[in-house]
Amino acid sequence: MRSTRAFRRAATVVAGLTALTALTALAACGQESDDDKDEAKGGTTTVEATDSFPITIENAYGSTTIEEEPERVATWGWGSTEAAIKAGVYPVAVAEQLWTVGAGNLLPWVEEAYDAAGVEHPSLLTDDGSGTTVPYDEFIAAKPDLILAPYSGLTEEQYDTLSDIAPVVAFPDDPWTTPWDETIRITATALGRSEQGEKILSDIDAFFADEAEKHPEFAGKTIAGIWANPNNLSIYTGLDPRVAIMAKLGFEVAPSVAALDTSDGGFFYEMSYEKADQLDADVIISYHETEEDATTLLANPKALAVPAIKSGAVAKVVGRVNVSSVSPPTALSYDWKNGLPTLIDTLAGVVK
């Protein structure tokens, strides 16, 4: 389920790994005919590289050197697909988003970008929804010369195994904690388009600055992001990009979020309803798969112990695609109409 990744993204993941000998065998089996090669033709670029190669990027597992401009890029995790596209490079293989749009489908904003550019859709890399199992054979078949995974849950062993296929750009610190802007910056740098990366960030900053100016009522208001379960609450810490990005609108992460934190530096933690009355925030953002879930869970007497829920100061994000578009927002989804723009309108209504 995408919910494992979009809402929990556990920092420790365990995967059954393919041995190097198996990779070698797969690679040997992967010798393709000319027809196969034509079918798996290279990616498309719309913005030229401005940086000089080789480029070396440090990550949590060491460093990665990209000797020359990549032509066939694969992405894994969340956000790097959109960052690459916005930087002018269309990946040839991307992780499927099973929970959000189901097998065989692209995220709507990604599909729109490929179609608008007239670029052939990428192959989809099988993902169970948590990123814990890496389809090495599918990576080999895609023949990438660069694998981008700056916001993912790769283990060190997975990173090492993928590195036998192509250079891998992983996260700088911990799994699933790379800030949204660093995901864009790292991706653009790896592609030799750091200047374009800064332009993307500048455009996003302008979007948020404009929205913050439209909504001065957001300034100084405290906020907390939650996923309400029948037996407990998942609370997103200030490290989680979907919460951290609210600061660009003028909000502040509620101090109670840190005070109740049991994650030991993680991006979320579970909290029993017994402590719900201690989650003090001016506004709650709650994420739900369906409207029925939202109605049921927010009417739960246990959830009503949260002061903002009791007073109705709740901005709901409902629906898998809508939730994914802001969890966290990406280089393509930040201004997608059903994502942040809708959430901002909802927040304005709640605050007023």
Image (cartoon, rainbow, N blue to C red):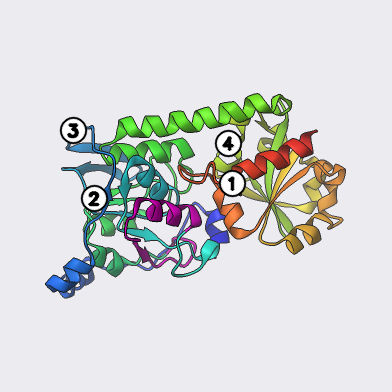
Q: Quadrant of residue 201?
A: top left
Residue designated by label 1? 337
Report if the CB atoms under discs 4 and 1 are less than 8 Å apart.
no
**Residue 167 has which mark?**
2
Q: Kindly report which numbered mark, 1 or 3, lies closer to the viewer in this rendering.
A: 1
Observer-nearest of 21 and 236: 236
Q: Residue at x 34, y 67 (%)?
A: 135
Image location of residue 346, percent across then percent down:
72, 42
Residue designated by label 4? 244
Q: In which quarter of the image is residue 279?
A: top right
**Residue 52 has which mark?**
3
Observer-nearest of 28 and 266: 28
Q: Kindly report which numbered mark, 2 or 1, lies closer to the viewer in this rendering.
A: 1
* Dot 4 or dot 3, earlier in sequence: 3
Observer-nearest of 21 and 197: 197
SS state under label 1 = loop
Write down the region rendered in magenta: 107-132
Tell me which amino acid carries mark 3: Ser
Q: How far apart are marks 1 and 3 (CA)?
A: 36 Å
* Dot 4 or dot 1, earlier in sequence: 4
Tell me which amino acid carries mark 1: Lys
Tell me which amino acid carries mark 2: Pro
Label 2 environment density (alpha carbons within 10 Å; few <14, some 14–19, many ≥20):
many
Name the side, left or right, on which 128 lies relative to 56: right
